[in-house]
Amino acid sequence: MRILDYLLVSMLALPGIAGQTTIAAAQVPEIPNANLQDIAMVTWHVGPLPQVGLPMYNGPVIIYNPIVIDQVGPVLTAFFRSHEYCHVARNHIQQQFFLGNPFNKAWISQGLELDADSCATATLLAQGNIASVRAAFLWFHGQGPIQHVPSHPPGQARANNIANTAKSMGVIP
């Protein structure tokens, strides 16, 4: 069983506003792409998705790099997968369609990344998955204050955000 197949079974839904379930994992196609220069990303796709047997699709798609997933392992992968589903559940991908000013796009995108990190942290902690939250905290903490991608906050900012979210739920990562 592939790591993402296992995670699909283990993480069926994300809590939404006021604890309501908003999106089931099976509703968002996950497409492997070994050329992706990241662990995963979410985008909007219009057209056929033969990889998952859909003749036509109009909606969010999670693209992941199976090589990177194998390298980081299932514990850290669970955080990044939850992070991508949080982008979908919180409608971040739709919001990005309407960001018209290129000068503030990176700043807004960084805020969406922090929001998805907080959502993933809360989701995983609600499921009792402290190990994935700790793994993500250590991953980002190890990146330090350097900003590697303009649309993503520096690793230290993301680690602090994860820690603050966890602490607000009574957990120290």
Image (tube, rainbow, N blue to C red):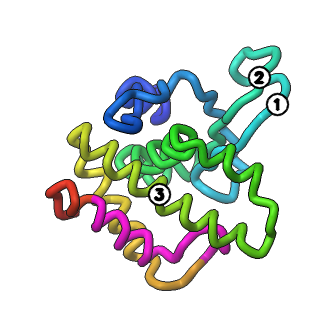
| Residue 77 falls left or right of residue 50 | left
- Residue at image point 36% right, 29% down: 20
Is the C terminus in the top left, top right, bottom left or bottom right quadrant? bottom left
Q: Is residue 49 magenta?
A: no
Q: Which residue lies furthest to the right in this view?
A: 47
Is the N terminus in the top left, top right, bottom left or bottom right quadrant? top left
Which residue in the structure is indicated by mark 2?
57
Please state the horizontal and vertical placement of residue 126, each as a whole percent of the image: 25, 41
**Amino acid type, label 1:** Val
Please state the horizontal and vertical placement of residue 29, each as a whole percent of the image: 63, 28
| Residue 145 falls left or right of residue 148 | left
**Amino acid type, label 2:** Tyr
- Residue at image point 46% right, 77% down: 143
In this view, 172 is above or below 156:
above
- Disc ID at residue 46: 1
Which residue in the structure is indicated by mark 3?
115
